[in-house]
Amino acid sequence: MVVPALEVDALRKSFGRRQAVDGMTFDIRAGELFGFVGSNGAGKTTTMRIILGVLTPDAGEVRWLGRPVDFAARRQFGYMPEERGLYPRMKVGEHLRYLGELHGLPPAAARAAAGRWIERLELSSCASEEVQNLSLGNQQRVQLAAALVHGPKALVLDEPFSGLDPVAVDVMRDVLAERAADRVTVMFSSHQLSLVERVCDRVGIVGGGRLIACGTVKELSEDADRRLLVDAPAAGEDWAAGLAGVEVVSREGTRTRLRLAKGADDQRVLHAALATGPVSAFVPEHPSLTELYRDLVARTRPPEEDAGETAGAGATAGATAGAGPSAGNRTEGGER
Amino acid sequence: MSTAARAPGEATGRDVPGGEEASASGRGTAGPRDGPGALSARRAVGLVTRREINSRMRTKSFLLSTLGLLLGLGVYALVILVSTEGPTRVGVDRDASAMRPVLAAVAEGAGDFEFVTVDGDHTDRLLRDGELSAVLGRTDGQLTLSVEREAEENLLAVVRAAAAEERTTRELERAGVDPGEFRKRVASASVKVDAREPSENSAAEQFALILSSTGLLYFFFVFYGILLAQGVVEEKTSRVVELLLSTIRPWQLLAGKLFGVAVVGLTQLVLLGSAAVALAQGTDAVTLPTAASGTLVTLGVWFLLGFFLFAAMLAAAAARVSRQEDLQGVVQPVMLLITTPFVLGIALLSKNAHDPVIEWLSLVPPLSPILMPARILLGTAPAWQIALSLVLAVAALAGTTRIAGRMYANSVLRSGSRVPLAEALRLRQRSAGSASTNLRAGGG
């Protein structure tokens, strides 16, 4: 059995009357890339800040290698805060060396590590520039280097990809994959779901301060509504109408994309399609993470309250794979 | 035997832990493998201190402010040098030339005067040109002092004394008394002044000393205190504090910042102080009661004590806010603590350096770092008072840093709106499920 490296257990945190995190539970194994997705205010940042000890939870616990996270454990973490955190007037190389030494590296090792990450993240041209004079994208690379310079055993990165150009995204992605391959536990939040799908081993979807789904994209898609692509050249506009549990997602020419609710019979769909004439394609499709996410958030959102960005965890949350403790009747939204 | 011979070559290959670590950590893209080692508190504080010093000393503003202050001192010195011209030249008309020996004798010790004999015809021109400050003449037995606008008080006193002396001598001679004998007898009846605490400075010098010593300290407390407070807020604004506090303790960060800024401030203070002391001695403008190095040590010690006292409070106050714009509001009460003794010191000390109120106030900590050094420099503070004020200041420092450290630790990670004072002061009961749930927090 694989022992999880980082465990987040039933965290709760409220700001005044606002419940930002409400029973957040998940775990990440060593060497795993864990994507943390969810709408704004779902509680991602608050959770990460609790893991790093920036915030104290009202209840619950974070464990590292089976023991409650303490100061010594946190020193093995690398953190990239949502609002970037560096001294604006410090030079890049100097800054990285300083953070390395503060994490206990001897001066020579800190210098070497800083140099290595500057090179790896393609920052050589601005190593002696002040942080404030860099472009936002480069500042972000420096921020990543700051999280990596002490060779952490776990990385907690809040929106590392936001605002990066495509090349920088590739560099960032490669570096994270490398770290994971080096047995580092990597957790990051992002709104770029296609990227998360490509990069992450597992994904946690957050809504209303708790995890509403968690697993590999494949696991998530197995649990979600199935998709079918049917190519029936002779079929009319509404050949699929009237089939129980079947919804037409889109039509492009002769091809129809369908979504099948749980329990819907795909063989009846095939029969209906054949009834119109020849069927040149009948393919089950894997939904993308984006589609899964939309389904989940739509499903968990209370029907009477669908305005705004509040992603309240509805009563159906308990049905999703790997979710935390079964949902209550919360209607209050999460963090800002 | 053969193993021994091969040993050197094999040792490196077999030395698995060390060898692997070394090669792994040197590997191209991989981060350092040898994980973060333990960081002693001293090293943590030292690292923060070094960063503070580097980032502050290397800035243009430090260089410019030091140069600017030195320049200010230089200009001040120049003004003093220019304003102290040579002796006051007084012309003595031929009619009054008999007065010269008496004038010279009286003027001895009363000021810097030079008496020259002039011809009555040119006196007006000489006065107008400023060659002479005054001309003493005699018309019909009456001494007249001609001046351009008004007579210098010292000179007038000298002339009057000389006239009286001359008249006395003449009257004595007329009465048949030997003026020399008379003078000797009068002199023997003098009063000896027994000053319990002799003041070594004139009133003007005292004022200059008070102003420069308290002023310099006040300036440094405010300037470097605010600098530190801004640094605290900067770390909060940029969120770098979240990175730092995942590896070092809040008190270590605070201590490092305090030490760093103190070193920078002390450097500038000693630079300026030595320049000022050199100036004071070079121009003879002010008599310092102790040796120059003693003055500097006094200033330095009290700077450190006062700085840590005030700066710890300022840092604790600053940690409550997240934006520079909000800083003013929270540091205001602490600034009042620095300003009050300065204003009090100037007002009371300059009136009377031996004011008992000042003596007592200068022993008490928030006031002592500004008042006591001024009294020491004036030479009016007895040793026991100095010792007592030092002990009290150190005790206050110990208490203040404890409270300030707690306030700092409680507030520095809470971004958003201002942290309420009560929460900043709260004893650290931050464990799960505690009071923090229901407290209104601005975070987000």
Image (cartoon, coloured by chain):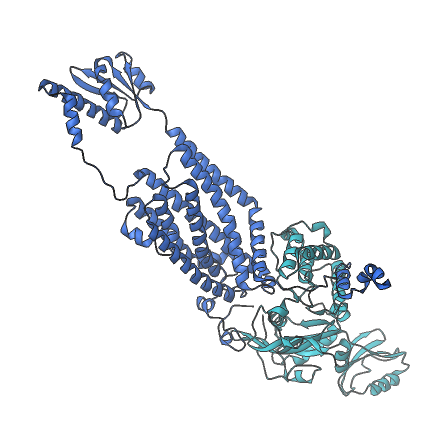
Q: In the depicted view, which residue is nearer to us: A97 or B196?
A: B196
User: Residue drawn 47% across and 58% down?
Assistant: B312
Q: Is residue B253 above or below residue A181?
A: above
Which of the 4 quarters of the picture holds residue A333?
A: bottom right
The N terminus of chain B - image quarter: bottom right
Q: In this view, does B145 lie above or below B296?
A: above
User: Residue drawn 60% across and 51% down?
Assistant: A89
Q: In the depicted view, which residue is nearer to us: A325 or B47?
A: B47
Outermost residue, left side:
B175
How many discs appear?
0
Please identify which colour was used for chain B in the image: blue
Q: Is residue B175 left or right of residue B280?
A: left
Q: Is residue A257 left or right of residue A63?
A: right
User: Residue drawn 63% across and 64% down?
Assistant: B38
Q: Is residue A280 left or right of residue B210?
A: right
Q: Looking at the picture, how far across and down is residue B76, in whole percent?
A: 42, 35
Q: Looking at the picture, how far across and down is residue B266, in whole percent?
A: 49, 48
The answer to whether residue B246 is visible is: yes
The answer to whether residue B418 is visible is: no
Q: In the depicted view, which residue is nearer to us: A235 or A58?
A: A58
Q: In this view, does B163 lie to the left or right of B8?
A: left
Please identify which colour was used for chain A in the image: cyan
User: Residue drawn 73% across and 51% down?
Assistant: A124
Q: Looking at the picture, how far across and down is residue B39, in whole percent?
A: 61, 62
Q: In the depicted view, which residue is nearer to us: B139 or B271?
A: B271
Q: Looking at the picture, how far across and down is residue A277, in whole percent?
A: 90, 82
The C terminus of chain B - image quarter: bottom right
